[in-house]
Amino acid sequence: MEVNEVFEKVKGLFVEELGIDSEKITMDAKLEEDLEIDSLGIVEVVMAFEDEFEIEIDDEELTDVGTVGQAVNLLHSKL
Amino acid sequence: MTEQRVVVTGLGTINPLGNNVSDTWKNLISGVSGIDHITLFDASDLPVTFAGEVKDFDANDYLGKQNARKLDRSGHLSIFAAEEAIKDAGFDINKQLGEEFGIIFGTGIGGIGATEDAVRVYENRGSKRISPLAITQLMPNSSTGQVAIKYGIKGPSLTITTACAASANAIGEAKRMIEHNIVDKVLVGGTESGTTSMTIGAFAQIKALSKQNNEPQKACKPFDVNRDGFVMAEGSTALILESEESAIKREAKIYGYVSGYGSTTDAYHITAPSEGGEGALRAMKQAIVDADIEVKSIDYINAHGTSTPANDKNETIAIKSLMGELAYQVPISSTKSMTGHLLGGGGAFEAMVSLLSLKNNKIAPTINLNDMDEDCDLNYTPNLSIDHNIDTAMSNSFGFGGHNAVLVFEKS
């Protein structure tokens, strides 16, 4: 799967699952500051990623994920 | 410091009869039933298929999807009712209410719907798929915390869970907070949203619910010989309690005094009321002493009146024990005949009804009362509202667990 395909899927999840405005979702968008995803929301996001991409994500892998782009790259590397 | 007198300066509600105070009052005095077939989920497999649901309310529209999905339905209703009460009292909902405000919510079963959902996910998909929002939605203090965050309430906070007495206790404890100068304003709420499959099934198992599925609007008939249980309902009601001094200083509109509070425990049985309503009677007496009035001053009683055989009979005996011959004259009504049983939200709702009755000198009826039980032989204001001068009203709330909370309201 290409990076931009992963991004589109991530965007879809954010809109569908979390109710976030699609215009706000760019590769540079910060999860906490720009998209207002708090610590509980991050857990939901990870669950949604795991279901959508049929992968498992460990907590340690999330340490450096602060933007949509970083999340997309993590997912892309695991596929 | 002298003891403060406590007044109510704001009201807000969302319930089966209306999504604001004025629609609700209009329907109450018109004798409208808010009870109907369940629409929130498929109830066809349940022995009871009707309830008092809130209508025409979309939490996604109201709060935005991203915020709405973080809360259980009980949280949505609490925030909605609180907004109306805060505005009604003349405060700005866009400013933090701050440290001068306390908050107390009453609820019977909190976010029980979120509990049910989480258990289903756990059973079907395992613990790793339980929503991270489950805990913050299901905890009984969720409404207290979420409303405090939304409106910036930073004073003392409590959540009271004395079943169907919860929000009457909340008002009583807020009264004491203000009287004792702990804080001069308290947002008090009562919320329930337990019209869910497991919860209705479980209440039906203990024979607490009416099973008159064919005629939902007629099922709740407090004090009638054919009553067969209460009707589950959902909703939230919020009140702004304030010291009279503070209310006068800011020239606020005043609905009336919260002048008496009684709180007792049956210590008898976990669901059945004590013989002759002994615990209820003690709570009524306490409230009257606290209000420093005589029994003969009571002009209206908003009864607990659940429509269960045991409650209505024992509450009637307790009122007779309290008032003697006067019991046959004082107008009583059970507005649960129209709303259904708001459980932990009932005390706050019926406090609102009592205050509106004081303000309008009108008493909402007990509907569906056509064939009086010989054990229930008082003046329950059957079927039609009446005009009646009311200076003092009393509201009864009793809960599973043997909790009794009684409030007295007076004209200001």
Image: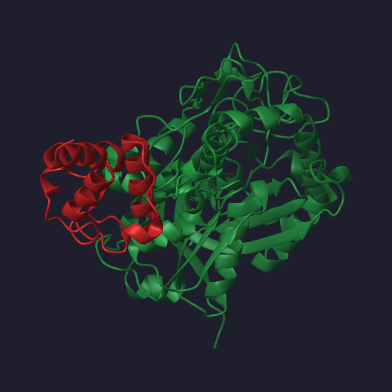
Chain colours: A red, B green
In the image, residue B252 sits, relative to residue B276, either above or below, namely below
Residue B411 lies, in percent from the top left, at 51, 58
Q: Nearer the viewer, residue B53 or B8?
A: B53
Image quadrant holding the N terminus of chain B, namely bottom right
Residue drawn at 58 percent across, 32 percent down: B340
Q: Nearer the viewer, residue A5 or A41?
A: A5
Q: Residue at x 54, y 39 (%)?
A: B126
Residue B357 in the image, given as x and y percentages of width and height = 51, 45
How many discs mark residues in the rendered view?
Answer: 0
**Is residue B195 among the parts visible in the rendering?**
yes
Image coordinates of residue A10 in percent, x first then y, are 22, 41
Q: Is residue B39 left or right of residue B345?
A: left
Q: Is residue B300 above or below residue B307?
A: below
Q: Residue at x 15, y 36 (%)?
A: A5
Looking at the image, residue A33 sits to the left or right of residue B369; the answer is left
Vertical arrangement, residue B405 with respect to residue B313, above or below? below
Seen from this angle, which residue lies furthest top? Answer: B214
In the rendered structure, the answer to whether residue B22 lies left or right of residue B269 reads left
| Quarter holding residue A3 | top left
In this orientation, does residue B396 appear?
no
Q: Residue at x 78, y 31 (%)?
A: B376
Residue B289 screen position, x and y as percent: 72, 66
Q: Quadrant of residue B231?
A: top right
